[in-house]
Amino acid sequence: MSGVNKVIIVGRLGGDPELKSVGNGQSVARLNVATSEMWTGKDGQKQERTEWHRIVVWGKQAENCAKFLAKGRQVYVEGRLQTRSWEDTASGQKKYATEIVANTVQFLGGGAGVERTSSSQADNFSDFGPEPSFDQSTDDIPF
């Protein structure tokens, strides 16, 4: 019996999508999406935890993400988890990155069908903690 590798998240973009073109001319976009959960602790105080997710989108869907999405926009993402590894040429250490490879990205909230012109509206979405800095190594990965 084979396993199931399926991820569904609904969250907000922590930055504008990064669109690249890889060797064969295919488009790939990287999104950083924040999800947040709230609960009341034993002491009665409200608690909140934010998780950041790396999303990779391929093809025409990647181009649409870059064209129509901006920081702060809410999205529904469905896909699978994938872990990549590569060797960092500077340190010689093996590096790993786990990301969601998206099959579906649905744009939620306002602004559907409107091209991104600025991210000034995104400044209203400061509910989440700061976006994490991901390793920006360029060895054998498109980002």
Image (cartoon, rainbow, N blue to C red):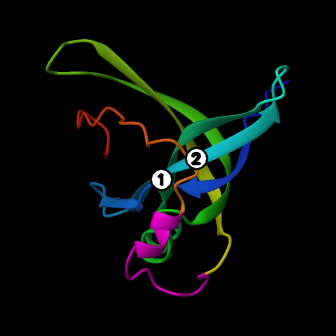
- Pick whichever of labels 1 and 2 is earlier in the sequence: 1
- Relative to the observer, which residue lies in front, 35 or 127? 127
**Quarter-of-image position of residue 15:** bottom left
Main secondary structure type of the part rendered in magenta: loop
Element type at marker 2? strand
Q: Is residue 48 above or below residue 1?
A: below
x and y, in percent, of residue 71 in the image: 46, 63
Q: Is residue 10 magenta?
A: no
Write down the residue under mark 2: 34
x and y, in percent, of residue 115 in the image: 46, 85
Identify residue type, mark 1.
Gly
Write down the residue under mark 1: 14
Work out whether residue 62 can be spotted. no
Q: Which residues are magenta?
A: 111-124
Q: What residue appears at the point 72 percent right and 35 percent down from the top-left corner?
A: 5
Identify residue type, mark 2.
Ala
User: Could you classify mark 1 by the number of other residues whose Cα lies within 10 Å: few (under 14), some (14-19), or many (20 or more)?
Assistant: many
Q: Is residue 90 above or below residue 107?
A: above
Work out whether residue 90 can be spotted. yes
Separation of residues labelled 1 and 2 (CA atoms): 6 Å
Q: Is residue 22 above or below residue 114?
A: above
- Relative to the observer, which residue lies in front, 52 or 126? 126
x and y, in percent, of residue 11 in the image: 65, 53
